[in-house]
Image (cartoon, rainbow, N blue to C red):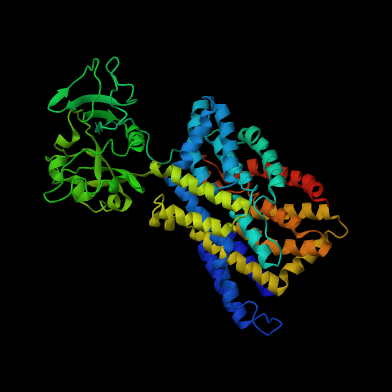
Amino acid sequence: MAAVFALIVVALAFYASEKLSYEMTSLAVICALLLLFHFMPVAGPDGANLMGAGRILSGFANPALLTVLALLVIGDGLSRTGALGQGAWLLLRAARGNPAASIMLGLVAVMAVSAFLNNIPVVVIFIPIMQALADKLGRGAGRYMMPLSFAAILGGMTTLIGSSTNLLVSGMLVELGERPFGFFDFTVPGLVLALGGLVYVIFVAPRLLPNREPLRGGLPVSGRQFVAQIKVLPESNLIGAESRLGVFPALSDITVLTIQRGEESILPPFDDIRLQADDVVVVAATRKTLTETLQADARLLHPDIPGPAGEVDGEAEERWTSGGQVLAEVMVPPNSPLVGRTLARIGFRYRYHCIVLGVERRSRMLRRRITDMALEAGDVLLIQGRSDDVMALRGNRDVLLMEWSAATLPALHYAKRASAIFLGVVALATTGAVPIVVAAVTGAAAMVLSGALGMRDAVRALDYQIIFTIAAALALGAAMQETGGAAFLATLLLGVLDGASPAVVLSAFFLLVGGLANIISTKATAVLFTPIAVGIAREIGVPVEIFAVAVIFAANCSFASPIGYQTNLLVMVPGRYRFMDFVKAGLPLLFIVWLIFSLFAPWYYGL
């Protein structure tokens, strides 16, 4: 037992100091446990080693871990298909353009969605939305980035799948011989805590946070204009679109340079011109506008370029309409063999497996099809292709890939499919038709099999930090249980609180777990304290569920530290936060949640 405690202290020190990555520390813990119990076995009634290699490594196949990983894949599918982003903007439209109301509604929406989905993709989607709303209010994004993370954490407290921490505690209960939690078993107290905390997050926290200007991540803001061409397809909604005062309202934020109708070129001013099928409209627009146009119809900006002799034209259009598409910019260097040649002559899409959507030429704006333009040194080409095809241009001397410009294009045509899969998983889990791990793994497989998410993207969605941290924490929890360490700590805590009522013990236990969750990983805290919670509940004769719920809520209260929860790290850069900013805004929230729990839980559970 002493050796296990010593190992836990060392592990917690490394987790808190981050001298090694979480994965390395977790791997070292697992190796240390394997060696410790190989030479110092814990004998069971039949003489077998209770902490053999199989028991220590069983965390890698734990249903809770598999559920967490499957939900990460499902969340990534929703994010990559744009389903989350579309839903976010639809919700915010309900505020009718009022930025302050939009922020409030956005935080409520984040809390609601986080009850059923991994917090990370939710926060990632809402970061640029909150930045835009902060700009409209004339305030720094720092006022709202941390509340965004806090709202996601609060929402994750309300259902079993809202947080990986919840699933881990439920899984640990099974290993300890107790009943696991159902989907909505702690939703009522969770909602009370979440709504009480949300009032603070909306009305108080922004006043405690700095009004620093945000650092803009991602692509630089730019009004650079690319020349592109739009093919009016026979089934296009653009057929019949009419110009008004020389502009086409159907092509918002796009400047029409010329219209190629057969052999005829129609130049401005465009008086009473209606677009017809097979028109080629040469336009100038920003990258953002072209991206939105591409998302509306993936074929609109794909120029017709005949393939080499004997090759099927279009090289299978599915190559550029399937998921996993990337937009990037490449520059034509002075010594490139492409200089002086047109895209049609080069056969760009067949040689590089990427489509040129637009051309930016700094010196002048040309009114001709991009397929007829002779490329010049310094031209910037906006290209689209699969991730591996775009990245294959890294060492190419014909063009210079500007890697900072690469961005994944949401596969919007799969958004409904991904949303249906997600809702199906939630329905199966909430009704109890199948175990939650079965629903989650089936949903993750459906994301891949339906084409909403590529196999490579699904593998990338798996977080190795989560895998190793959870496996190590489960192994440590088992070691504490089998060596008697959990029972010892439970007795020690009760000795300190000698004579106190169960309600006081519950409140003190919550505060202890909540404080440590801000120093070390929430998952490690949850797994380490679940056996102690079970021991305390058995010792004082109250239902185990009450103290297990306390572990879930307290371990999720990692508001006062950026390292306590991953969403806190996500908002740290765009909010330009320092460590003390989290202490200033997060510590009061921790005490608010603790106070509400201390008052509500004893009444709700009848202590």
Q: Quadrant of residue 512?
A: bottom right
The answer to whether residue 169 is left or right of residue 347 is: right
Q: Quadrant of residue 348?
A: top left
The answer to whether residue 489 is left or right of residue 23 is: right
Between residue 562 and residue 468, name the one nearer to us. Answer: 468
Locate residue 519, reporting x and y percent.
Answer: 63, 55
Which residue is located at x 55 percent, y 27 percent? Answer: 95
Between residue 369 and residue 580, name the one nearer to us. Answer: 369
Locate residue 447, reporting x and y percent.
Answer: 44, 52
Between residue 88 and residue 397, name the one nearer to us. Answer: 88
Locate residue 268, reporting x and y percent.
Answer: 21, 19
Residue placed farthest to the bottom in the image? Answer: 47
Which residue is located at x 86 percent, y 56 percent? Answer: 500
Residue placed farthest to the right in the image? Answer: 499
The answer to whether residue 295 is left or right of residue 279 is: right
Locate residue 261, reporting x and y percent.
Answer: 17, 26
Residue 520 can be seen, yes or no: no
Residue 400 can be seen, yes or no: yes
The answer to whether residue 27 is left or right of residue 505 is: left
* Vertical arrangement, residue 283 with respect to residue 319, above or below: above
Between residue 242 and residue 24, name the one nearer to us. Answer: 242
